[in-house]
Image (tube, rainbow, N blue to C red):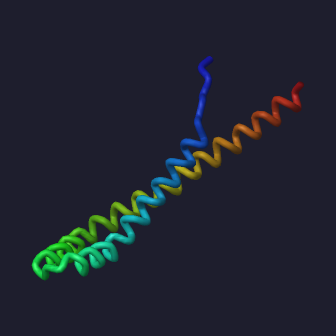
Amino acid sequence: MADLVVDTDLVEETASNLDIVAREFDDADRYAQTVADAVGDDTLAGAITAFAHDWSERRSTLQESIANLAELTAAVASEFRSLDRDLAASLEENQ
């Protein structure tokens, strides 16, 4: 019988990193405006804000998907931790 080994710390870290990426996507419009204000050239500033605006819908869809994946990944880690505790308790009871 094969053993299933899950690095729950790594799964939790992945969930946390996905959450960070989702938040970065969520803040992209604000970042774009900050960059546009700082470039000092109206044409370049306009291109930056136009790009951010044009990509907004796709970015929003991606952000929602990444946030959902972060939640699901965190749930996987939580369930495996819970399962591990339950199995350990069961083994201790049967000894």
User: x, y (%) of residue 87?
Assistant: 75, 34
User: Quarter of the image holding residue 28?
Assistant: bottom left
* Vertical arrangement, residue 49 with respect to residue 95, above or below: below
User: x, y (%) of residue 94?
Assistant: 87, 27
User: x, y (%) of residue 32?
Assistant: 27, 73
Q: Locate the C terminus and report the quarter of the image it occupies.
A: top right
The tally of labels here is 0
Q: Locate the N terminus and report the quarter of the image it occupies.
A: top right
Outermost residue toward the top? 1
Residue 69 appears left or right of 29: right
Residue 86 appears left or right of 57: right
User: x, y (%) of residue 5?
Assistant: 60, 30
* Vertical arrangement, residue 91 with respect to residue 53, above or below: above
Residue at the (19%, 73%) spot, across then down: 48
* Vertical arrangement, residue 24 with respect to residue 11, above or below: below
Residue at the (52%, 49%) spot, across then down: 73
User: Quarter of the image holding residue 64?
Assistant: bottom left
Residue at the (59%, 20%) spot, across then down: 2
Residue at the (59%, 35%) spot, across then down: 6
- Foreground residue among 44 and 78: 44
Residue 94 appears left or right of 77: right
